[in-house]
Amino acid sequence: MSETAIHVEGLGKRYRLGQRERYRAMRDVLARAFTTMFERNGERKDGYMWALRNASFDVRQGEVVGLIGRNGAGKTTLLKLLSRITRPTEGFAEIHGRVGSLLEVGTGFHPELSGRENIYLSGAILGMSKREIDRKHDEIVAFAEVERFLDAPLKHFSTGMQMRLAFAVAAHLEPEILLVDEVLAVGDLEFQKKCLGKMQEVSKSGRTIVFVSHQMNQIRRLCERVFWIDAGQIREEGVAGDVVARYESASLSPGNNSADEKRCFLGWSICGEGNTVRDGLRDVTFHFHLRLREAVSQGHFGVAILSDSSAVLAGWGFDNLDMPAGDQEILLRIPALPLRPGAYSITCSIFNRGNNLTGGQLLEEWYAVPPLVIDTRPLAHPQDRWAGVLNIPAEIEVSAQQEK
Amino acid sequence: MNRMGAVAKTDILAGIPVLRITPPTGWQLLPAKELWDYRELLYFFVWREIKIRYKQTAIGAAWAVLQPFLTMLVFSLFFGRLAHISSEGLPYPIFYYSALLPWMYFASSLQNATSTIVDNQRVITKVYFPRIALPLSAVLSGLVDFGISFLLFILMMVYYHIRPTVALVWLPAFLLLAVLTALGVGLWLSAMNAIYRDVRYVVPFLINFWMLASPVAYGSSIVPEKWRWLYGLNPMAGVIEGFRWSLAGHGMPSGRLLFASMGVVLVVLAGGIAYFQRMETTVADVV
């Protein structure tokens, strides 16, 4: 199995700054045409930004390749180029075989349609033929564990059920080359493991997978080779374990981070346990690593834990903070974190001279990478609808009321 | 280099298709072969449009009949009975309904096609397929409504004792002309709406304006003979006159008018395809 599946040479994608500012309205265009008319030699003042540049590599058939790197480094851009969602600005790529891309779970789902109808719709959008879906239908339903609700409209499904159904459809995609963005970061942990297992199965059957994740344990488990993408360039390429180790130490240890100068947050961890909470009922200490270019006086530090639908589950803010310039570590201790097993995001912010309300200067708002993983035993109601967000043990006692 | 600059050739050794992804170059042709490869997805898009349209409305398919029927009643009363506009010898309901059939199809297709790229932006930014499938499915799904409202017309023909003539065999050709007109204009509008969001607000006005310029509420006989061909530059004039003729067997449209309509449709369609394909290369970055 040494034939090439993907061959990429000098691939680059340039965005015009502002182009990502969503759409334009015709009146803006007219207004701009009017102003540029009166500008000397009509120079364009728009800047450009290379989201990816000079990417050259080969992926062999049957290989599982991981893409790692910070948010905005260009990983998703690379996947979008390979899946033809967007076109390159320079260079080219050759794809040998049928490509399936999975950049989001539940692509094409429609709330008004039933579970069964959505299986067909989403399957077709992801590139399955009707015959293929017919054949795998029962398997998909069994995998998602939604047999009983199959004919109800999707809008009546709980988020967990929708997610499982979406995963199930995606997991049964069988293209020769599968491009996966960070879709395994959501959903409950049990199900994530099941999906991971399914992906391992797929990769053993000789399919090529290119896989983006922020969860290094997933990368270590699944991938043979890893590309580390940094600021639009492939910074390093090699055996998964080695590259991941260097990436992790670089993102924690200051000094190696060549990229943006303005960053304050370098990384985070939970004392001794990576980024995973294994007992939600015991105290947890978060370590946030910062590099301050200036001293902070009367500053503010804010932290919030968010669900995958971006609801704030818990948040804390600390005012009147004084820190000297240089590398700092903030320890956040909480007595317990009884959240349901799954992946959560953390967002932090740091302000100088005040907070968000008193006109403090925002130094950085950071969406923590990697996400927080809660890997504990589920203790709440077995049905998604009733399980809520907390994972707290409960006991009942039944006793007969004595009438007096 | 053809469609999307992505050329499928066959790897001689492995027999696996090779896809080459390159920067976009110039104007592209219709990705006919690729569209054929994606025909099942096209089918699912049409199916989704129809399913959702009928699921979200209380009386479902009855809308397809109610809209042209009520419009026909109002037209018959005001334009016919009160304003005495000539119906060229046909009963007013037949005269108006035979024009409203293609007109309503055209108007709703245009409306659906315009917003289709924007409505599907989530899918567009997450997965590849020939984007032209979206406006195409919007235009094709309108045919179901057309079919339903056509059933009512058959009942009306029976009621008014109007026998279809030989001209009926031309109906599919005029229907095709209506589809191509809707597709041609729909491609332009959906591509423009993806880039300039205010297009969506222009469309209702455009449709109203266009209806007044089409022989829906009147017959094209009010246009002097020597200017008929000019009138035919509005392709819906050809479509509507063609429908009236093939359905009610009355007032064969002038050949000049028809040819002018067909010519315009081809130009609009070819331009629409080219413009749409050009927009397609950047759409995932913009929407």
Image (cartoon, coloured by chain):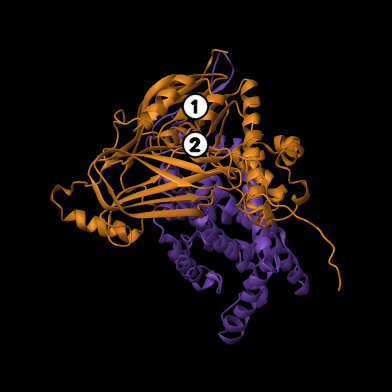
Comes first in the chain, label 2 or label 1: 1
Based on the displayed image, in which of its 4 quarters is residue A124 positioned?
top right
The answer to whether any part of residue A294 appears in the image is yes
Q: Which residue is mark 1?
A: A66
Q: Which mark is residue A305?
A: none
Residue furthest to the right in view is: A403
The answer to which of A236 and A244 lies nearer the viewer is A244
The answer to whether any part of residue B171 appears in the image is no
Q: Give the left or right position of residue A341, taking residue B6 as reference.
A: right
* Chain identifier matching the purple colour in the rendered picture: B
The residue located at (39%, 27%) in the rendering is: A249
Count of labels shown? 2
> Can you give x and y, in whole percent of width and height, for residue B278 in the image?
41, 43
Q: Assess whether mark 1 and mark 2 are in contact (beta carbons under 8 angstroms).
A: no
Q: Are marks 2 and 1 on the same chain?
A: yes
The residue located at (60%, 35%) in the rendering is: B37
Closer mark to the observer between disc 2 and disc 1:
2
Q: Which residue is mark 2?
A: A275
Q: Residues within 10 Å of mark 2 (few under 14, many from 20)?
A: some
Q: Give the left or right position of residue B2, taking residue A295 as reference.
A: right
The amino acid type of the residue labelled 2 equals Asn
* Chain identifier matching the orange colour in the rendered picture: A
